[in-house]
Image (cartoon, grey):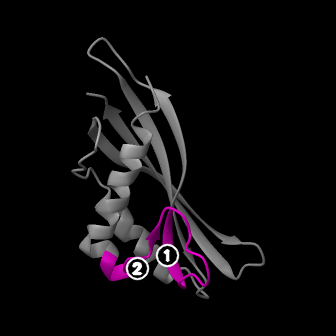
Amino acid sequence: MSYALSAPLQAAVYQYLLADAGVQASIGAHVYDALPSGRVPDLYATLGAEVVRDKSDASGSGAEHDLTISVVTGASGFQQAKEAAAAISDALDDPVLTLSRGRLVGMRFLKAQAARVGTGTIRRIDLKFRARVEDN
């Protein structure tokens, strides 16, 4: 096992979300790996934490990546954030991703957690996905 497929997987997920019509309809191009400097939009998604486990076997090298994608809003309620989270969840329901190295065997939704952040003026939904990848 190696961590070598982490960056190719993240890049593919990022590009896939930017190109997805449902995600575009809910949050536009406001999907970030790193937040832009200055003012951020009222509703956006960020690629976040990742946990990787070895899943190599006799057929070759592989890994299981648990990815977090967060939807964040300054809106007074969760409605817009939930709609955006649903669009992201739909987009990443067993997507066809092209990685620059290796291949995606499958991806599935694991869980989500919605919460108010800090003083309660910010709302965030953390979506967890599991991706299984194999190296070439």
The residue under label 1 is 44
CB under 8 Å between discs 2 and 1: yes
Stretch of the chain drawn in magenta: 24-46
Q: Amino acid at mark 1?
A: Tyr
User: Up-down: is 132 above or below 107?
Assistant: above
Gap between marks 2 and 1 measured at Cα: 6 Å
Quarter of the image that includes the N terminus: top left
| Residue visible at 40% across and 79% down in the picture | 27
Compared across the picture, whether 40 is left or right of 60 comes to right
| Residue visible at 73% across and 79% down in the picture | 120
Is 29 magenta? The answer is yes
User: Up-down: is 76 above or below 120?
Assistant: below
User: Residue 109 placed where, x, y %?
Assistant: 39, 51
Quarter of the image that includes the C terminus: top left
| Residue visible at 30% across and 11% down in the picture | 58
The residue under label 2 is 27
10 Å crowding of disc 2: few (<14), some (14-19), many (20+): many
Tell me how many marks there are. Answer: 2
Outermost residue toward the right in this view: 119
Per the image, label 2 sits on a secondary structure element best described as: helix
> Front-most of 90 and 38?
38
User: Residue 48 placed where, x, y %?
Assistant: 54, 55
Per the image, label 1 sits on a secondary structure element best described as: strand
